[in-house]
Amino acid sequence: MKNNKSLGQHWLKNRAILDEIADAAAIDSDENTVCLEIGPGLGTLTSSLLKRFHKVIAVEFDEKLAENLPKSFPGKDLEVVHGDILSADVPALVQTNNYVVAGNIPYYITSPIIRQMISLTPAPRRIVLLMQKEVAERVAADAGHQSILSLMAQNRAEVELGPVVKAEEFTPPPKVDSQVLILAPLDESQVDDAVLKFASRGFSNPRKKLSSNLADSRMSKADWENALREEGINPNARAEDLSLWDWEDLYSRQNPEKTLAKK
């Protein structure tokens, strides 16, 4: 079947890699675990998932693919939902606390999907997504290369990089390599959501120094430079240089009336 370029469709057919993705999703699962698959496409990953999970619920945006997919797996417990994963009510679809998420996701909606998946209640036990290599690396980045997306992900999940998948493994091949990103959601987020909202101010202009982005009527640029020094942070630092805990400490300085205990 011809791919739809507007939907970012690239078919991965290497069975060894597909099995590796499915294995990563199945770690710590049991016979009752449900797998939610994002964008099953032609069903190449679906095939591997059905060998490891008793039920797979696949959400496919392409109407023709959604209609044809069940025909490829007669007798299997596969439920195909035609729709947009970003507007899907995932808890209502899976109807269980015991589920994982897997998928080869379109590059152009990677960030929204990550944000959605790590915010689900109840949270999936595991999230395994194949995406653009650069984005996967960005989500798993350490202090020095952070972004709001990486802070959000690392606040709510343990983040691990899986195998790199070369562009030539896809049909048609994308312009860049891909990589598997593995997220294991935590029972509780590491810092309060208010901290991340505060951190977003620091990323408002990535080219500017952090002290300039944070300056407001309560604390001037000079005040923030002093605060950074006192926290052992370079006063010339930019937002990407700070860890979650750095952001929590700085938030507490501007909001001393609020106590945020570290998990």
Image (spheres, helix red, strand yellow):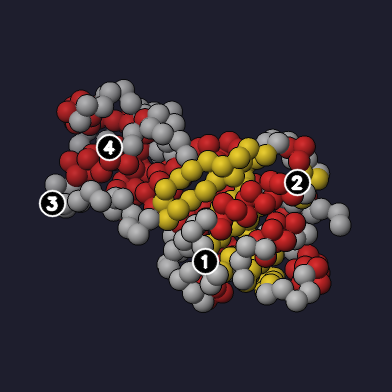
Pointer 4 local density, CA inside 10 Å: few below 14, some 14–19, many at least 20: some
Identify the residue at image location x=53%, y=72%: 32
What residue does disc 2 label?
Answer: 14
Q: Nearer the viewer, residue 198 or 50?
A: 50
Residues at marks 3 and 1, CA–CA distance in whole angstroms = 45 Å
Give the mark toward the camera: 1 or 4.
Answer: 1
| Pointers 3 and 2 in contact (C-beta within 8 Å) | no
Residues at marks 1 and 2, CA–CA distance in whole angstroms = 26 Å
| Pointers 1 and 2 in contact (C-beta within 8 Å) | no
Pointer 2 local density, CA inside 10 Å: few below 14, some 14–19, many at least 20: few
State the SS at label 1: loop
Q: Nearer the viewer, residue 262 or 45?
A: 45
Pointer 3 local density, CA inside 10 Å: few below 14, some 14–19, many at least 20: few
Task: Tell me if residue 231 comes above or below residue 62 in the rendering.
Answer: above
The first of marks 2 and 4 along the sequence is: 2
The first of marks 3 and 1 along the sequence is: 1
What residue does disc 1 label?
Answer: 30
Residues at marks 2 and 4, CA–CA distance in whole angstroms = 42 Å
What residue does disc 4 label?
Answer: 246
Residue 55: x and y, percent? 62, 71
